[in-house]
């Protein structure tokens, strides 16, 4: 198994949340879709901070 991970992006989180909603899946606050959205927001914030953008 590879140790390299791919950070969650806003686009990927959006696809996950959309797919879960369309299939009648859980999109509540504790769901995978919700955690993906949160991770994407954190990653986007970390990326913008590391490149000097605000």
Image (cartoon, helix red, strand yellow):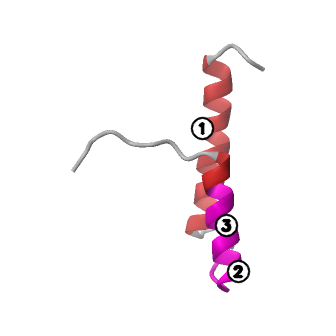
Where residue 19 sits, quadrant-wise, is bottom right
Q: Do labels 1 and 3 touch, CB within 8 Å?
A: no
Q: Which residue is mark 3?
A: 17
Give the residue at the far top of this rendering: 52
Q: Do labels 1 and 2 touch, CB within 8 Å?
A: no
Q: Which is nearer the eye, 40 or 28?
A: 40
Where residue 14 sits, quadrant-wise, is bottom right
Give the residues in magenta: 13-26
Point 60% across, 45% down: residue? 9
How many other residues sit within 10 Å of disc 3, few (<14), some (14-19) or many (≥20)? many
Give the residue at the far right of this rendering: 54
Point 63% across, 40% down: residue? 42
Q: Quadrant of the C terminus?
A: top right
How many other residues sit within 10 Å of disc 2, few (<14), some (14-19) or many (≥20)? few
Look at the image and tell me whether residue 52 can be seen.
yes
Look at the image and tell me whether residue 29 can be seen.
no
12 on left or right of 4: right
Residue 23, horizontal then vertical, whole percent: 65, 84
Q: Which mark is residue 30?
A: none
Q: Which residue is mark 1?
A: 43
The answer to which of marks 2 and 3 sits earlier in the sequence is 3
Query: What is the CA distance from the residue labelled 1 to the residue labelled 3?
Result: 17 Å
The answer to which of marks 1 and 2 sits earlier in the sequence is 2
Q: Which residue is mark 2?
A: 22
Query: What is the CA distance from the residue labelled 2 to the residue labelled 3?
Result: 9 Å
């Amino acid at each position: 198994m590879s140790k390299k991970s791919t950070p969650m992006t806003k686009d990927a989180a959006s696809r996950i949340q959309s797919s879960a909603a369309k299939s009648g899946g859980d999109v509540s606050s504790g769901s995978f879709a919700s955690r993906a959205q949160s991770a994407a927001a954190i990653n986007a914030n970390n990326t913008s901070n590391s490149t000097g953008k605000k």
